[in-house]
């Protein structure tokens, strides 16, 4: 079965399960790094919120041998869990003053997202771009996030600077920066002490936020970069391991800078989903100049 036939079968079978009173349609979605996905929308009468059920992964499961009955059951499970959302209060996004307390910054690749960036307010940062999302925590669906587009600024009656300033404040308040050694991070995740001898600790550090979600944006904060330099007492390199975090390597322990770029490329190719890649690049921070620059990139 081809992918297009698979999509048609999914929609037909879902319609048969839920009846005519519920509207279904498949919507192409352009994600980060120009990754194209297909989302199944299932919308009941009277509701204006529908969970996004992405079908590309289900097709890979089908090709690997998972039956259509199992796939439909999983999709219906997503649908029924999403029904508990009901009519989500969207005032956090539609009302200007509420929006100003929910908007945050995220960092994405500039070159890979030119099509998206044509439609959204953003600020260029080296070979990257800062974009803005309106976010809200929901007890059922977790974090709901909406990418802010240029037309939203007109709806709210604000300019890009007002948006940016609010997003910076909220990012600091809602998603504060987190910087620790790799061994500390592993120990905290596993709730155990794996490396007790600090003399054996690998001099590799992680910069993210408290939620470990879209924390790479902290590499754009000049004050944070300066604090990291003070802590390390050295110049350092930033390796963008994903949109969620960056690896920090003190300059004193690096003998071959090309190996750093190879490390980033390998991580991006083998460990990171395509839509979560930040950049095939290495950045260098100079403490004396208080300056971050692109050292090398693919």
Image (spheres, helix red, strand yellow):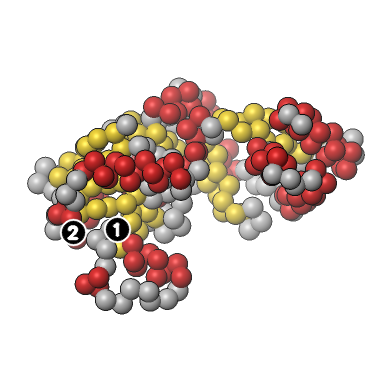
Q: Are marks 1 and 2 in contact (CB under 8 Å)?
A: yes
Image: 113 above or below 276: above
Do we see residue 58 in this rendering? no
In this rendering, position of residue 224 left or right of residue 152: left
In this rendering, position of residue 18 left or right of residue 142: right
Quadrant showing the C terminus = top left
Q: Secondary structure at mark 1?
A: strand
Residue 58 location, x and y as percent? 69, 42
Residue 292 location, x and y as percent? 21, 41
In space, the residues marked 1 and 2 are separated at their CA atoms by: 10 Å
Mark 1 is surrounded, within 10 Å at the Cα level, by few (under 14), some (14 to 19) or many (20 or more) other residues, namely many
Q: Residue tagged by mark 1?
A: 205
Instruction: Tell me the residue at 75%/47% (across/down).
Output: 66
Query: In the image as oriented, which residue stretches furthest toward the left?
Result: 288
Image: 95 above or below 3: below
Residue 98 location, x and y as percent? 52, 45
Q: Quadrant of residue 7?
A: top right
Instruction: Tell me the residue at 89%/35% (across/down).
Output: 20
Residue 235 location, x and y as percent? 15, 50
Instruction: Tell me the residue at 58%/30% (across/down).
Output: 36
Quadrant showing the N terminus = top right
């Amino acid at each position: 079965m081809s992918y297009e036939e698979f999509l048609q079968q999914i929609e037909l079978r879902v319609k048969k399960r839920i009846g005519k009173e519920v509207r279904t349609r498949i919507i192409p979605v352009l994600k980060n790094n120009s990754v194209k996905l297909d989302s199944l929308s299932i919308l009941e009468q009277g509701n204006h919120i529908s969970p996004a059920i992405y079908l590309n992964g289900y097709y890979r499961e089908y090709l690997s041998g998972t039956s259509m009955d199992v796939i439909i059951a999983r999709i219906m499970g997503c649908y029924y869990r999403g029904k508990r959302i009901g009519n989500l209060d969207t005032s956090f996004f539609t009302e200007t003053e509420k929006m100003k307390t929910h908007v945050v910054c995220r960092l994405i690749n500039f070159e890979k997202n030119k099509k998206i960036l044509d439609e959204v307010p953003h600020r260029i940062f080296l070979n990257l771009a800062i974009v803005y999302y309106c976010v809200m925590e929901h007890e059922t669906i977790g974090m709901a996030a909406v990418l802010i587009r240029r037309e939203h600024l007109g709806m709210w009656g604000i300019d890009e600077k007002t948006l940016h300033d609010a997003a910076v404040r909220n990012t600091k308040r809602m998603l504060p920066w987190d910087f620790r050694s790799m061994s500390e991070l592993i120990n905290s995740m596993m709730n155990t002490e794996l490396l007790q001898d600090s003399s054996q600790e690998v001099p590799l550090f992680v910069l993210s936020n408290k939620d470990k979600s879209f924390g790479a944006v902290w590499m754009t904060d000049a004050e944070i970069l300066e604090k990291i330099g003070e802590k390390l007492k050295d110049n350092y390199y930033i390796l963008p391991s994903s949109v969620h975090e960056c690896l920090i390597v003190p300059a004193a322990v690096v003998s071959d800078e090309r190996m750093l770029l190879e490390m980033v490329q390998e991580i991006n190719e083998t460990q990171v989903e395509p839509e979560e890649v930040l950049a095939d690049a290495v950045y260098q921070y100079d403490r004396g100049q208080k300056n971050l620059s692109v050292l090398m990139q693919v």
